[in-house]
Image (tube, rainbow, N blue to C red):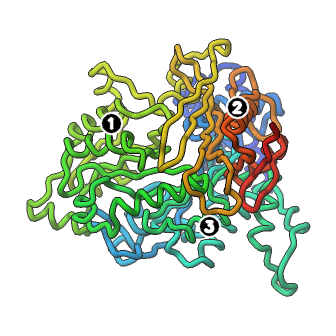
Amino acid sequence: MELEMKENGYNKACREILERVLAGEIKDESQLNKVKKEVSKHYHLASLPRNGDIITKGTTEEQAIIKEFLKRKPVRTISGVAVIAVMTSPAPCPHGVCLPCPGGPNSAFKSPQSYMGREPAAMRAIQHEFDPYAQVKSRLSQLKEIGHDVEKVELIVMGGTFSARNLDYQEWFIKRCLEAMNDFTTKEWRKNAWKIGKSIPYIPLEEVQKANEKADIRNVGITFETRPDWAAEEHVDEFLKLGGTKVELGVQSVYDFVLTRMQRGHGVAEVVRANQILRDSAFKVGFHMMPHLPGSDSKLDLRGFKKLFEDSRFRPDYLKIYPTLVTEGTPLYKLWEAGDYEALSDEEAAELIADVKGILPKWVRLQRIQRDIPAHQIFAGVRKSNLRQLAEEKLREKGGKCRCIRCREVGHTGLRGRKVNEKDIELTVETYEACGGIEHFIAFEDLAADVLIGFTRLRFPFAPYRPELQEAALIRELHVYGSMVPVGKGAKQTDWQHRGYGKELLEQAENIARENGYEKLAIISGIGAREYYRKFGYTLDNVYMSKILRS
């Protein structure tokens, strides 16, 4: 009886808060927290009502309104997908330890290699004992609770060199991630899945993937982090089998002498080869770069970033910049302690990043600037957490402007108040060479407002090794930005997804491929995006979605 009364009071409190939001009494988060405290006191609650519970107390119409108001951190899904980062269990890197690398199973932190265990994704992983199913389920619940749609999930696999783990672990890890998505709303799919064995039935990876194609929570992409020397053909084949669509390479520098000095264990040649193999297998490719490594300085680093985009052997689609940090227990810490290494200051880092942002082409996305390592764990190096903001301010002072995808995508520009008029949107195509092949960056843009609505990456490959891709043009990415619109739902006036831009981008890519003599177009598709491509005549071709182009 007492438990029932408590639940009744909690439900009433949630409903009262919802009604006060709908009535316009609550305008912002501080007012919301104040009302939560008042209502909790009135109903003698032990804890404040959660946003997810407040949402469930409304009608369908009320929920649509309240979700927009209660949605915290809209940036989490503003690019059109819900990003979920999971971390593998601690394991050593196959080559040893780089000079600045913290963490690892043999470190004081007992964390995955290159992580210190205090980063948000690492803490979630540790909390769930690195169980992939629990990590995904927990993050989905968190995002759902604060008002985000989670129907389209981009999975990022972190925690070191994934392709160096044994194949059984790789398959188990991804299968459990997908099962968590499939199970999130219902487990009915398990009844229809083909199983191996009777006493302890086992559902193979292929069946889990098949179920995800039509699941309520669909995986639209999987990103793997690895080293360039662990991204050869056999590793790429495994990434494809698991459903991978993007690979982030720990490149760190474009200079061999810097890589040698940091004890990286590979050179620039491995970077170039991995980049070509991945692109010619239709993957999106991201580079992780580390300015101010031992032997380098800001002048050389800036020259290296220019080389990254001037030299067609590189030209990544995505970029993460992690200024070198001095952390406890690393070989670099000993150099710094002995006075043989001087770290980059906040001011110097902001200056360098500003110069880098000023030279970025329109087809690259600067995803991240600096690591998630807490300031108290950094002995020397960048401590300010708003490095991107500081760099943007410096760039504006210089009269420059960043034209990377992230700075122009419609979701992020909308958060900054930049308006787009649909009649001003036009189709653009920029062509450039990369890794011996030809890239076409096909985009819908408002050129006057400098806003990007969506794009596709069409590649005419150099030397694909996969049999499905012989004589085929490749679509490596198709993305429409703005707040996520759930699968099967129509777009609201303020939404950009599900308005037909994806279809038009696909048609334009087909036309360009056809005009250049290609009779086949192959797409690297997220497992949960396969149904979308089937609507346009594409069929599953081993791991790709392919279509014969009619003249």
Mark 3 and mark 1 lie on one chain; the one further toward the N terminus is: 3
Looking at the figure, which quarter contains the C terminus?
Answer: top right
Q: Nearer the viewer, mark 1 or mark 2?
A: 2
Q: Are marks 3 and 1 in contact (CB under 8 Å)?
A: no
Q: Are marks 1 and 2 in contact (CB under 8 Å)?
A: no
Circle 1 residue: 356
Tag shown at residue 508: 2
Q: Is residue 329 left or right of residue 138?
A: left
Circle 3 residue: 237
| Secondary structure at numbered mark 1 | helix
Q: Amino acid at mark 1?
A: Val
Q: Position of residue 398 (x, y in %)?
A: 27, 22
Crowdedness near tag 2: few (<14), some (14–19) or many (≥20) residues, C-alpha within 10 Å: some
Q: Is residue 424 above or below residue 330?
A: above
Mark 1 and mark 2 lie on one chain; the one further toward the N terminus is: 1
Looking at the figure, which quarter contains the N terminus?
Answer: bottom right
Crowdedness near tag 3: few (<14), some (14–19) or many (≥20) residues, C-alpha within 10 Å: some
Q: Amino acid at mark 3?
A: Asp
Q: Position of residue 462 (x, y in %)?
A: 55, 52
**Disc 1 to disc 2, C-alpha distance:** 32 Å
Q: Amino acid at mark 2?
A: Gln
Q: Is residue 493 above or below residue 480?
A: above
Q: Residue furthest front?
A: 517
